[in-house]
Amino acid sequence: MRDYPGMTVADLDAVAEAEALIHPFPWTRGNFADSLAAGHGGWLAQEDKRMTGYAIMMQALDEAHLLNISVLPELQRSGRGSALLIHLFAQARLQAATRMLLEVRPGNVAGQGFYRRHGFVEIGRRRDYYPAHEGREDAIVMARDL
């Protein structure tokens, strides 16, 4: 059974460990802790009490900003990311959001395709947004109406 409990400080070691496996430039435990302390929404994706993924989303007025959504490497491309994203759409609507924004790396073609399949479109770029192996990398900004 899939479940999406709220992320707590007690979850941060496991989340940071998973993040390090998933991303070449992972968020730190401190980044997750700071997000929760700032009041951003955090959720775990679980199946039978086992974490399969997680997400962090910031709400500002009528916009939700998806800051991080991740699924464990061995479970990617199994529909779990889509299920978690649909859960986030519902959470954002509960907070009166009418639009969701996110950033994605230009080199993350799979991520871009995932977001497009869920109705996101490119609305701009942020220069030098992400750390890269050599300097910085731009971000593609995408949005979707809720």
Image (cartoon, helix red, strand yellow):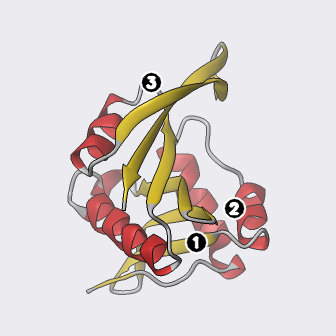
Q: Give the amino acid type for the residue marked by disc 1 in the picture.
A: Gly
Q: Residue at x 57, y 63 (%)?
A: 56
Give neighbour class at mark 2: few <14, some 14-19, many 20+ (Cα, 10 Å): many
Q: Is residue 70 above or below residue 8?
A: above
Query: In the image, residue 9 lies at what x, y percent?
Result: 71, 77
- The front one of 47 and 62 is 62
* Amino acid type of the residue tagged 3 in the rendering: Pro
Split into 4 quadrants, where in the image is the C terminus? bottom left
Identify the image quadrant of residue 16: bottom right
Q: N-terminal of the two: label 2 or label 3?
A: 2
Whether label 1 touches label 3, CB < 8 Å: no
Mark 1 and mark 2 residues within 8 Å of each other at the beta carbon: yes
| SS state under label 3 | loop
Which mark, by number, is residue 42? 1
Residue at disc 2, secondary structure: helix
> In the displayed structure, does residue 129 sit left or right of residue 1?
right
| Label 1, label 2: how far apart the Cα atoms are | 9 Å
50 or 113, which lies in front? 113
Direction from residue 75 to residue 57 in the image, left or right: right
- Name the front one of labels 2 and 3: 3
Q: Residues within 10 Å of mark 3 (few under 14, many from 20)?
A: some
